[in-house]
Amino acid sequence: MSTARTERAYQEAKARYAEVGVDTEAALSTLESVPISLHCWQGDDVRGFERAGASLAGSGIQVTGSHPGRARSIAELRCDLEKALSLLPGQHRLNLHAMYGEFGGRDVDRDEISPEHYQSWVEWAAEHGLGLDFNATCFAHPKADSGFTLSHRDSAVRRFWIEHVKRCREIGAFMGQARGSACVHNLWIPDGSKDISVDRFERRAALREALDEIYAVPYGQGNLVDALESKLFGIGSESFVVGSHEFYLAYALQAGKIVCLDLGHFHPTESVSDKLSTLLQFFDGVLLHVSRGVRWDSDHVVMTTDEVGELMREVVRCRALERVHIALDFFDATMSRVGAWVIGARATRAALLAALLEPMDRLKEAEGAGDVFARLAWLEESKALPMGDIWDYFCLKSSVPIRDDWISEVQQYDRMVAAERDR
């Protein structure tokens, strides 16, 4: 689509939105400023770069597919990330797991990691204007094979994982200070049982005690934000998950932390978007892991599904863009890994644009007057507004491909770069 045609279509769409009281220029300005955190683990199938090599067996995580081109080194992962970023409009951050450090070929166990192992990531992020987020890696390790980490019955194993997470918080604070933007450190653990458990109380008491020690060291909010991620169930934890939504909700509220809502971590019929307006009454912020669960927490590549759209609308309706941290979390080895990043990130930002273009004044006027017919009618009519023309213009102004032009770029990259890795 030509530049002139895109600009002409935008002006027509801008006028149409103005008719219903929507300022598209304000919407685009806001859209450009909201960062989305890209997850590094999509690029290498959640393997990391520890010397011993991580196995996902027993971790509650399963990556399927054998598409060629998996990143095998930090250099290859960064190359893929740079390609993905070149196709994405707007601001971005990079979300790292602890097992993606630069260890120089040495065996550095999880309870020994330190900021020096992530210095090169800080430098790379600075070069590309990215903020950094961080995650403790409490899986894919011999001491996690039992399915328990921070709630393990063995105090020595518990001590190992406590030390790991403490070090991850230190690393996150280092990243936040170095980049001048608070690092969100998210904690997810696989702890749980495949079948019926009779010691739920003891397991959760152990987890609470471990968290108390982990969070005993304060870091300034300007450098580090602590988040806790729950799960309904997982592979190998179908009957009991220690870190449930209720557990982390209560703990985070008491400890002054925030909770992470992952779209795939709740019951398939449960509305995650509906939780936002409640949580934002009591928490300073919320972390969102945008994913797409299919029947179970399968972490499919994000699309503009109804739930993703409703989630973004709730963020905007709650006027919470500065309080909600948006991050991606999926992994798919059946397709181009760079392509998966681009699909998910563009879909998430497009859903946010649709939310920003909602005729909110008309909707509030109808709702305030008790006119439920007009409210529903405007919600339906807004779906036919020319949002696509606004999106094309945003991509044009961001100097990234418009419409489907990016698809051929990903395919060419896979042929020339990624596919060569398997030769």
Image (cartoon, rainbow, N blue to C red):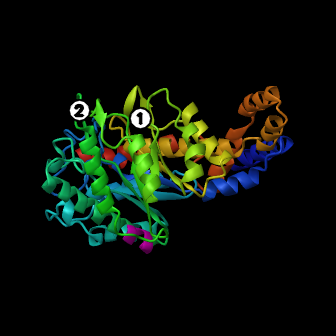
Q: Label 2: how many residues lie within 10 Å, few (<14), some (14-19) or many (20+)?
A: few
Q: Please state, as top left, top right, bottom left or bottom right, where the N terminus lies in the image.
A: top right
Residue 268 against residue 315 in the figure, above or below: above
Label tally: 2
Magenta-colored span: 173-178
Task: Name the kind of residue labelled 1 in the image.
Answer: His
On the image, the x and y values in percent for residue 2 come to: 68, 46
Whether residue 327 is visible here, answered yes or no, is yes
Q: Is 282 left or right of 61, judged from the image as shown?
A: right
**Badge 2 element:** loop
Q: Which residue is mark 1?
A: 300
Residue 342 location in percent, x, y? 48, 45
Question: Which residue carries the number 2 mark?
Answer: 197
Tell me what residue is drawn at x 33 percent, y 68 percent.
170
Q: Marks 2 and 1: which is nearer the front?
A: 2
Q: Nearer the viewer, residue 171 or 400?
A: 171
Picture coordinates of residue 358, whole percent (x, y): 72, 41
Question: Which mark, by number, is residue 165?
Answer: none
Residue 18 locus on image (x, y percent):
83, 45
| Viewport quadrant of the C terminus | top left
Check contact, mark 2 vs mark 1: CB within 8 A.
Answer: no
Query: Magenta includes 175?
Result: yes
Q: Residue at x 78, y 50 (%)?
A: 23
- Looking at numbered disc 2 in the image, what kind of residue is underneath it? Ser
Front one among 182 and 352: 182
* Residue 64 shows in the view: no
- Report which quarter residue 332 is drawn in: top left
**Could you give the CA–CA distance between mark 2 and mark 1, rounded to whole angstroms?**
30 Å
**What is the magenta segment's predominant secondary structure?**
helix
Tag 1 secondary structure = strand
